[in-house]
Amino acid sequence: MGSRQILVAGAGSGIGESIFKKLKFSSGVEVIGASRRGNDLSEGIRAGRNHFCDFSEEQSIFEFCKLLKSSWTRLDAIYFTFGDGLFSTLENLDPESWKKHLFLNLTAPFLLTRELTPLLQKGSFLCYLSSTAGRQGFPESSAYCASKHGLAGFAKALREEWKDREIRVSVVYAGAIDTPIWDGREGFDRKDMIPVEDVAEFLASLSDQKPSFNLDEIVLLPKKGIL
Ligand SMILES: NC(=O)c1ccc[n+]([C@@H]2O[C@H](COP(=O)([O-])OP(=O)(O)OC[C@H]3O[C@@H](n4cnc5c(N)ncnc54)[C@H](OP(=O)(O)O)[C@@H]3O)[C@@H](O)[C@H]2O)c1
């Protein structure tokens, strides 16, 4: 078997960028990224590069997947690390923001998974990045909690549905990790958060675990617990 072929969906910044960099310098791995700040698709798919995809646009997801399927014949792992936060009281949460948020954090991972299914095979690994907000509620976070609970539910259902195909599916409930997603949010001490490189090193290693077991659910918290 040749190199392991891996997609990091959401490699522009934060956790995804850090996983992408770890994998790029791992031996026996060909990794590509996808996010809004990626390279133009007219340049083709090239290992070690981030490629343009706007996961908030259905058409952009289809275009990226079409190109990927015409370039690679299999995918050994996909990291679903794109997403955003939406924090507001219910009264201030407008329906349009809710819709956009749910599309990016929940519908887009579904569409991407569905489109790339033909590239998956026995032993392929899918890693969905949920959150502590995918296990419990937080105030002023109803949209974010709904999208992350939804993503966890989607991943767990897929894990059951694809048991016989031996496709590995993990959902990661991460606590606070120091990334740009926290910029502008007050009341949190960044020093208490997990350094993003530490999380990335752990998550990158998951794609290389023995295929004889499945890590169904992973809870990953800062030393001080939920902040
Ligand atoms: N940091 C934490 O404490 C934490 C904890 C639990 C879960 N998470 C989850 O981890 C995910 C990544 O967050 P992060 O902490 O790494 O923050 P981040 O630095 O803001 O990362 C967001 C990532 O999503 C990509 N992205 C955002 N909108 C996109 C779009 N429309 N199309 C394509 N890509 C898009 C960004 O790339 P471009 O800007 O290039 O598009 C970037 O790679 C989020 O779903 C977040 O909920 C984070």
Image (tube, rainbow, N blue to C red):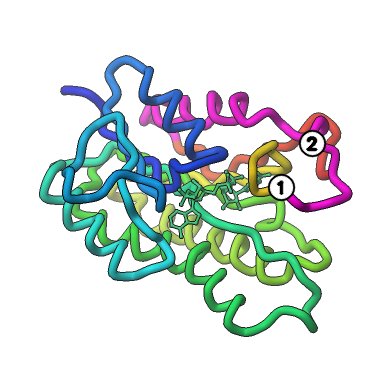
Q: Find residue 75 and report its horizontal and vertical position in percent.
A: 25, 41
Number of residues whose C-alpha sits closer than 10 Å to that of mark 1, classed few (under 14), some (14–19) or many (20 or more): some
Q: Nearer the viewer, residue 53 or 77?
A: 53
Residue at image mark 2: 190
Residue extending furthest toward the top:
27
Q: Is residue 109 left or right of residue 167?
A: right
Let me know if residue 29 is in the magenta part: no
Amino acid identity at mark 2: Arg
Query: Disc number at residue 14?
Result: none
Residue at image mark 1: 182
Q: Which residue shows up at 52% across the image and 62% down it? A: 105
Let me know if residue 195 is in the magenta part: yes
Residue 126 sits above or below residue 212 on the image: below
Q: Is residue 176 left or right of residue 160?
A: right
Q: CA distance from mark 1 to mark 2?
A: 8 Å
Residue 215 sits above or below residue 114 on the image: above
Q: Is residue 162 left or right of residue 175?
A: left
Is ligand 1 closer than 8 angstroms to the Cβ of mark 1? yes
Q: Find residue 156 and report its horizontal and vertical position in percent.
A: 50, 56
* Residue segment shown in magenta: 184-213
Amino acid identity at mark 1: Trp
Asked if marks 1 and 2 touch (Cβ < 8 Å), the reply is yes
Q: Find residue 142 and report its horizontal and vertical position in percent.
A: 72, 71
